[in-house]
Image (spheres, grey):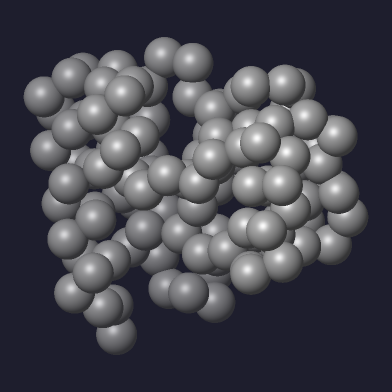
């Protein structure tokens, strides 16, 4: 069963997609409503390979703390391990919510969707 928090997040994302003509938010809403067993995990090591300094990244799954980042990123994910969060913050990066992400990047331009 999908939690009320996830349902509200999907509604926020769909609303932002329609309002700002931004398909990235609709895609995230679609990922949010998938069963949790269908969601992926991603290690910091892999995020480090796929991104560069100051990238804004959204990952519709859980970020795990295996590996290190060599640069700072801004990350929005559905879930994150404590060790991953610590490592991102130590590198000068930020963790933001989906609402902050929509507010700062309403059209989704400059946001990298991993997954």
State the image quarter where residue 42 is shown: bottom right
Residue displayed at 72% across by 21% down: 53
Residue 50's x, y, as percent? 77, 31
State the image quarter where residue 5 is shown: bottom left
State the image quarter where residue 64 is shown: bottom right
Is 99 above or below relative to 101?
Answer: below
Residue displayed at 28% across by 77% down: 2
- Which corner quadrant holds the N terminus? bottom left
Foreground pick, 86 / 33? 86
Residue displayed at 72% across by 47% down: 90
Left or right: 58, with 3 as reference point? right
Q: Is residue 54 visible?
A: yes
Residue 63's x, y, as percent? 65, 59
Residue 96's x, y, as percent? 42, 44
Residue 67's x, y, as percent? 88, 55
- Which corner quadrant holds the C terminus? top right
Q: Is residue 40 visible?
A: no
């Amino acid at each position: 069963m999908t939690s009320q928090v996830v349902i509200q997040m999907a509604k926020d994302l769909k609303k932002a997609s329609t309002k700002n003509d931004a398909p990235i938010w609709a895609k995230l809403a679609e990922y949010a409503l998938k069963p949790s067993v269908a969601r992926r995990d991603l290690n910091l090591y892999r995020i480090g390979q796929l991104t560069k300094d100051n990238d804004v990244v959204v990952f519709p799954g859980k970020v795990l703390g295996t590996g290190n980042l060599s640069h700072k990123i801004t990350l929005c994910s559905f879930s994150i391990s404590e060790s991953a969060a610590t490592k991102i913050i130590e590198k000068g990066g930020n963790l933001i919510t989906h609402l902050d992400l929509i507010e700062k990047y309403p059209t989704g331009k400059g946001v990298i969707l991993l997954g």
